Image: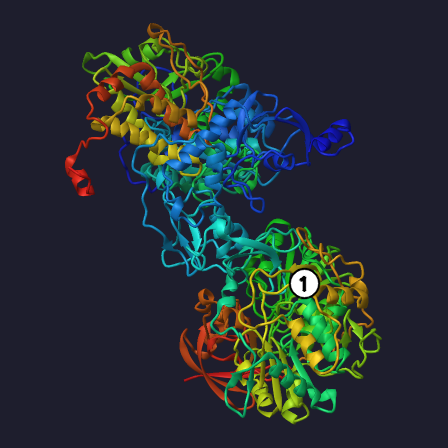
């Protein structure tokens, strides 16, 4: 430390920044830097409670008061609100400073209950820590403390103990400023000031758990962690959330080999320390009673029965080697796996088995070549100040909630303009600069009109002024990022691809951020778990050393595999952590395929609807139990680390692949993780220089995108289906809380999934004469009818109908068909 | 035109001898009507001002050394110069008068709303802006109604709004009713409230209203009485204005005197030319202490001000004299207490006000004021401990560190500590609660000690029935 100081003192002029005096030392702050941050960088910790580096400072708790002389004599100033100015003299240890700190701490503690021994925060509590380090040591308060009802549930997941609250405004500020869910607020005043919810409105935010993490006392506790452990019993490891493709950085915390808590880790590149409640509480799934703990095989049509690994591997080898032609094998899934396991399975199936009917997407994604072939943006690039973001994806708050927080910050604070091209309006609400909301099937046409400058008249229900604004924004020269995903499961991905092609024609320099949600999907695509591509996004004609039996021709995607199975040209179906019965939009197709196919091998962590129908079940270790790597939607490599051991005989996916290879008389050549990593670095040029043991540890991982040996096929060819005046176009998208495997297996989250109803625009409700909650009949173009409950959906454009996917109530899968470019339906009352 | 139904003036104004700059119409029963205003020279200053360059109007106000009447006493003309060249910008009129003892702005708003409206237009014009918010305290129903009526009449007469008086100048005045919080009298809290948020002060720096005020745009916040001086200044010029009052503090002040005097009320008094003694005992003013009693203490500038005693009676009524003597003239609210007053009880009374009105935003004020209140209550309940007296002072020091302003007490060898106090808080509300404590203990420590000496020991219940309910052993 002294060495650094000395060298800094020698060349003070050469150094950029603002010189100031910190406790007698001459140091420099970055221009505009807050005193509290500058002091911390120079090794002086100024205590605080309300300050949070990712939120606007408010200067409320007064804990960071320090004596500052800006030339007009020393005065106490809050360091969290004070930018350093040249020549400022700061004394963090002077008598007035320490007296102010003593005073503030004594005042904070007079009404704070001394229930630390039974408080979840005890042991990791900033109030405790600061009281020890900076406080007066004893209290002179002999009056009765303030009393409130002990913890009240302010949501399903969060409890509030107002007696412990020190009113720092962190949770309320987070709710309003970061999450945009201002559902908790200060009420009453003076010493009676308290945080509370509004009557009849609970704190039902997707991000509520963050308030628990940033609470500087034990006032906010989470239902899943309450009384689960003491901080000093916890051990933790840093990892990456595999729950969605954002790849939020997390700390996995365990006590007695059980995951008990996940905390957000501040990563500049991704989550800024925030997590959605799904990313935070999903660890409960590791303890689910539905975990698969031992291999099972089906013996003669009955339920699968437990068996030994050898037997199960043997049956798997039989299923894979039985079909004479590798084209009679189909593999669905792989996004749940780590990058290393994905490579192992890709090598097993593609390199040694010539199987190319492999798809990590379940019919709800985009063509791999489009995802891999488009120029990729980072989250930071998408959020670049004064940029333009086109939202050609479903509501990110529902699908990629942590990404939503970053985008929301960019829009709220950094002047980013949003062009909304999802058919249903998103959670950005009035922050959207241009609201296009094309009807299903019309996205390509709308984007084409923008590219052609045909914005003078309204088109397909999109008003001319919105088209004009959108074109102005896109041609303004500001950096453009397109968030591209599947905004609607009820229309073909071709419409999205058409829109992408048109946008690229209009803005050749546009970058793309894929908003596909499925876990480590980008690792899967990069490792070749997709038809027609080998690791590194290379085509099948690439020669890879050791891949002795590569596929000869591009295979089928998930829909193709299921169709082929129904047609009888697939004998063996392998599920890599996939549940097609629940997850594929066209459920009838999946069910029919499962009926017809010869043998099904499921590698999974849970007993799902699909696993239940498998002939061989191989139990796999899951997130929290596996070591490996993750590739997020930016292409950023970050480590996944095991904190607890997997239950029973569950094994890591790559080991299962190696066992299967050995069982078939082959050899993947892997006995440990490092072997796979070494081979990936050798096989995939983009990974060539990666130091796997340090990449992404304690820092943001590198962007790793393979060399593309192809150009994405982008055509503006998807025809706009004609619509009749009585038909409604269906929009199906996902909610954060649904019946997905991870959520359904997490005890605290399971109950949060709502019920699906048929959403209709206010105009269509009036046209139909329907009222909220009314039973209506839905007739599909094929003639099938379903009964549904109609509700007003103010986010929908006129002429569209909305059903959320994978919830109780109206089953969206009943309405979907994989073959249709859009789904038309008619709604009648009565 | 006017549809006002007649409501009698609320009492409070004392029509005595002397110069009347802002209260010139207060004696009329119909002083609040447009007719009376126009018949007595109303809006002539505005019409003249609109035909001068704005800079000249602003220069006249600056020359007149118009000191702010809200409490801080900062020259309005200089404050006006702080706005950066950024538009839109706003004028906010602080009519949230709620300092304990203060009721002079209420009279200005109730009895002469047109004078205020005229002044707002002049100020807006001088500041180069066209949107003025008139924030009136929630509890002042009559003032709100009369301003609303007056605004309607002024709009109808073309004196506010589009193309005022046939010029190409358009200025809008928006009346906003407060919801009843003392703290909203603080300018940044007022702005928060105006924006629709909880009335909690903003930190200065960086949120000086002149740079970042309403909607983070440059904003001037002026007190009602400050602005009420503008018509006179424009009509008569800065030199004429400076003939009144003292050199440092020209003009008059409306002083609201309450408490144990024979004739309490609002008086318009020339600054610096009258002493407290003359004000309390003079025939033209309060006419002495009630029942011929002895003066015990008086608060010279509202509940926030440290107390004065007989030694300070000969100070002139002028901020520059009161400040160094250890208190402030503040908002011109003077509370007089005679020798029958219990100093400890009076102290609790004022402290309780601040504890109840603390907004809860920052720690020292939220926790400190209520702690002070609890300790004082306990002493008065007969539960005091000897260490409580110093404890009160030390809680005060956590809110307001350093030497707290206090009046000199030559007999006790105590020197004056000048105003203002230092603070660990965001705004001056918390430190204000220390004023009565420091004042009372420094002067009347023996009264505290007497109560504590007579107290039940602290660990014995004063109210046995309550302790029994709480389940403690008898």
Q: Residue at x 47, y 16 (%)?
A: B250
Quarter of the image for residue B351 reads top left
Quadrant (top left/top right/bottom left/bottom right) for the C terminus of chain B: top left
**Nearer to us in this view, B223 or A528:** A528
**Dot 1 falls on which chain?**
A
**Nearer to us in this view, B317 or B160:** B317
Secondary-structure class at tag 1: strand
The count of marks equals 1
Quarter of the image for residue A602 reads bottom right
Left or right of residue A446: residue A650:
left
Q: Which residue is mark 1?
A: A629
Quarter of the image for residue B267 reads top left
Is B449 placed above or below A498 here?
above
Question: From where the camera sits, is residue B356 visible?
Answer: yes
Q: Position of residue A166 (x, y in %)?
A: 42, 42
Q: Position of residue A790 (x, y in %)?
A: 44, 76
| Colour pattern | rainbow
Dot 1, how many residues are within 10 Å of its Cα: few (below 14), some (14-19), or many (20+)?
many
Q: Position of residue A387 (x, y in %)?
A: 69, 54
Question: From where the camera sits, is residue A502 visible?
Answer: no
Is A387 placed above or below B340 here?
below
Q: Position of residue A782 (x, y in %)?
A: 56, 90
Quadrant (top left/top right/bottom left/bottom right) for the N terminus of chain B: top left
């Amino acid at each position: 430390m002294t060495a650094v100081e000395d060298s800094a003192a020698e060349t003070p002029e050469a150094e950029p920044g603002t010189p100031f005096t910190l406790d007698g030392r001459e140091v420099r702050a970055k221009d505009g830097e807050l005193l509290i941050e500058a002091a911390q960088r120079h090794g002086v910790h100024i205590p605080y409670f309300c300050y949070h580096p990712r939120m606007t400072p408010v200067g409320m708790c007064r804990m960071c008061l320090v004596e500052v002389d800006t030339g007009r004599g020393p005065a106490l100033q809050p360091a969290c609100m004070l930018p350093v100015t040249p020549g400022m003299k700061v004394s963090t240890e002077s008598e007035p400073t320490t007296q102010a700190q003593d005073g503030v701490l004594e005042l904070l503690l007079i009404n704070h209950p001394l229930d630390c021994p039974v408080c979840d925060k005890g042991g990791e509590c900033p109030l405790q820590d600061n009281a020890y380090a900076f406080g007066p040591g004893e209290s002179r308060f002999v009056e009765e403390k303030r009393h409130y009802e002990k913890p009240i549930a302010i949501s399903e997941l969060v409890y509030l103990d107002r007696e412990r609250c020190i009113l720092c405004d962190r949770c309320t500020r987070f709710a309003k400023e970061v999450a945009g869910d201002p559902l908790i607020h200060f009420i009453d005043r003076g010493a009676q000031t308290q945080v509370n919810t509004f009557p009849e409105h609970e704190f039902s935010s997707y991000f509520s758990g963050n308030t628990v993490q940033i609470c500087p006392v034990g006032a906010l506790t989470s239902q899943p962690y309450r009384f689960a452990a003491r901080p000093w019993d916890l051990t933790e490891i840093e990892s990456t959330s595999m729950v969605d493709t954002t790849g939020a950085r997390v700390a996995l915390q365990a006590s007695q080999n059980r995951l008990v808590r996940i905390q957000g880790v501040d990563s500049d590149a991704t989550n800024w320390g925030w997590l959605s409640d799904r990313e935070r509480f999903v660890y409960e799934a590791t303890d689910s009673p539905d975990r698969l703990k031992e291999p099972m095989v089906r013996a003669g049509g009955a339920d699968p029965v437990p068996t030994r690994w050898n037997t199960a591997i043997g049956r798997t080898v039989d299923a894979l080697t039985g079909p004479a032609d590798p084209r009679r094998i189909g593999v669905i899934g792989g996004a749940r796996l780590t990058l290393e396991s994905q490579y192992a399975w890709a090598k097993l199936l593609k390199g040694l088995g010539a199987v190319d009917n492999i798809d990590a997407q379940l019919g709800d994604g985009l063509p791999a070549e489009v995802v891999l072939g488009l120029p990729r943006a980072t989250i930071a690039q998408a959020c670049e100040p004064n940029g333009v973001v086109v939202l050609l994806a479903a509501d990110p708050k529902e699908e990629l909630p942590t990404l939503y927080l970053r985008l929301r910050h960019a829009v709220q604070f950094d002047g980013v303009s949003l062009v909304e091209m999802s058919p249903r309006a998103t959670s950005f609400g009035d922050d959207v600069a241009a609201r296009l909301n094309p009807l299903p099937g019309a996205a390509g046409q709308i984007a084409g009109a923008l590219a052609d400058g045909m914005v003078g008249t309204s088109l397909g229900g999109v008003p001319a002024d919105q088209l004009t604004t959108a074109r102005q924004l896109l041609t303004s020269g500001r950096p453009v990022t397109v968030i591209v995903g599947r905004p609607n499961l009820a229309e073909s991905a071709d419409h999205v691809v058409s829109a992408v092609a048109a946008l690229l024609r209009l803005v050749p320099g546009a970058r793309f951020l894929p908003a596909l949600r499925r876990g480590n999907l980008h690792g899967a695509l990069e490792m070749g778990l997709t038809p027609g591509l080998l690791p590194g996004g290379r085509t099948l004609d690439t020669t890879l050393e050791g891949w002795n039996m590569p596929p000869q021709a591009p295979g089928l995607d998930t829909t193709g595999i299921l169709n082929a199975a129904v047609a009888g040209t697939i004998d063996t179906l392998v599920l890599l952590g996939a549940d097609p019965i629940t997850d594929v939009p066209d459920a009838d197709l999946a069910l029919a395929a499962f009926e017809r196919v010869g043998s099904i091998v499921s590698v999974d962590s849970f007993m799902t609807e699909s696993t239940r129908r498998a002939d061989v079940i191989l139990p796999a270790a899951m997130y929290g139990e596996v070591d490996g790597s993750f590739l997020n939607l930016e292409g950023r490599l970050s480590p996944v680390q095991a904190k607890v051991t997997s239950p029973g005989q569950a094994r890591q996916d790559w080991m299962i692949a190696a066992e299967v290879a050995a069982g078939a008389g082959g050899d993947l050549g892997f006995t440990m993780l490092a072997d796979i990593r070494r081979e990936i670095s050798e096989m995939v040029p983009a990974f060539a220089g990666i130091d796997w043991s340090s990449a992404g540890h304690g820092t943001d991982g590198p962007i790793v995108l393979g060399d593309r040996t192809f150009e994405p096929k982008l055509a503006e060819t998807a025809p706009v289906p004609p619509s009749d005046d009585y038909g409604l176009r269906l929009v199906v998208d996902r909610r954060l809380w649904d019946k997905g495997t991870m959520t359904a297996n997490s005890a605290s989250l399971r109950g949060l999934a709502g019920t699906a109803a048929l959403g209709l625009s206010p105009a269509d409700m009036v046209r139909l004469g329907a009222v909220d909650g009314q039973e209506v009949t839905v007739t599909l173009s094929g003639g099938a009818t379903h009964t549904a409950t109609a509700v007003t959906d103010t986010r929908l454009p006129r002429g569209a109908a909305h059903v959320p996917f994978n919830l109780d109530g109206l089953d969206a899968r009943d309405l979907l068909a994989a073959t249709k470019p859009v789904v038309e339906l008619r709604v009648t009352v009565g | 035109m006017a549809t006002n139904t007649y409501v009698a003036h609320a009492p409070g104004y004392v029509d005595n001898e002397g110069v009347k700059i802002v209260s010139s119409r207060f004696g009329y029963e119909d002083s609040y009507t447009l007719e009376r205003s126009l018949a007595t020279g109303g809006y002539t200053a505005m019409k003249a001002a609109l035909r001068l360059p704005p800079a000249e109007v602003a220069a006249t106000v600056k020359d007149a050394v118009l000191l702010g009447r809200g409490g801080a006493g900062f020259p309005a003309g200089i404050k006006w110069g702080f706005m950066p060249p950024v538009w839109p910008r706003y004028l906010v009129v602080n009519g949230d008068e709620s300092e304990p003892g203060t009721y002079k702005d209420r009279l200005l708003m109730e009895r002469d709303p047109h004078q205020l409206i005229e002044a707002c237009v002049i100020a807006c014009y001088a500041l180069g802006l066209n949107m003025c918010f008139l924030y009136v305290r929630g509890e002042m129903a009559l003032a709100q109604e009369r301003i609303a009526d007056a605004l309607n009449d002024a709009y109808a007469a073309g004196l506010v709004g589009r193309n005022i008086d046939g010029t190409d100048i358009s200025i809008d005045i928006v009346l906003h009713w407060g919801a009843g919080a003392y703290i909203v009298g603080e300018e940044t809290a007022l702005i928060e409230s105006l924006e629709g948020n909880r009335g909690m002060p903003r930190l200065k720096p960086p949120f000086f209203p002149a740079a970042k005020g309403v909607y983070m745009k440059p904003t001037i916040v002026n007190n009602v009485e400050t602005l009420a001086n503008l018509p006179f200044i424009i009509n008569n010029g800065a030199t004429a204005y400076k003939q009144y009052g003292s050199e440092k503090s020209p003009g008059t002040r409306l002083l609201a005197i309450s408490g144990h005097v024979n004739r309490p009320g609002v008086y318009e008094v020339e600054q610096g030319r009258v002493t407290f003694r003359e004000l309390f005992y003079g025939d033209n003013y309060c006419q002495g202490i009630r029942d011929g009693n002895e003066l015990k203490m008086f608060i010279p500038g509202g509940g926030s001000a440290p107390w004065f005693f007989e030694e300070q009676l000969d100070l002139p009524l002028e901020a520059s004299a009161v400040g160094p003597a250890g208190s402030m003239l503040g908002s011109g609210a003077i509370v007089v207490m005679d020798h029958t007053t219990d100093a400890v009880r009076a102290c609790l009374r004022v402290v309780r006000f601040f504890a109840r009105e603390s907004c809860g935003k920052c720690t020292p004020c939220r926790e400190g004021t209520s702690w002070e209140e609890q300790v004082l209550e306990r002493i008065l309940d007969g539960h005091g401990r000897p260490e409580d007296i110093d404890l009160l002072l030390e809680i005060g020091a956590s809110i307001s560190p350093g030497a707290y302003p206090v009046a000199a007490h030559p007999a006790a060898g105590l020197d004056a500590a000048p105003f203002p106090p230092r603070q660990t808080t965001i705004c001056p509300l918390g430190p204000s609660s220390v004023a009565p404590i420091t004042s009372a203990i420094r002067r009347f420590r023996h009264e505290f000690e007497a109560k504590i000496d007579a107290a039940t020991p602290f660990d014995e219940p004063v109210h046995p029935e309550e302790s029994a309910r709480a389940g403690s052993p008898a």
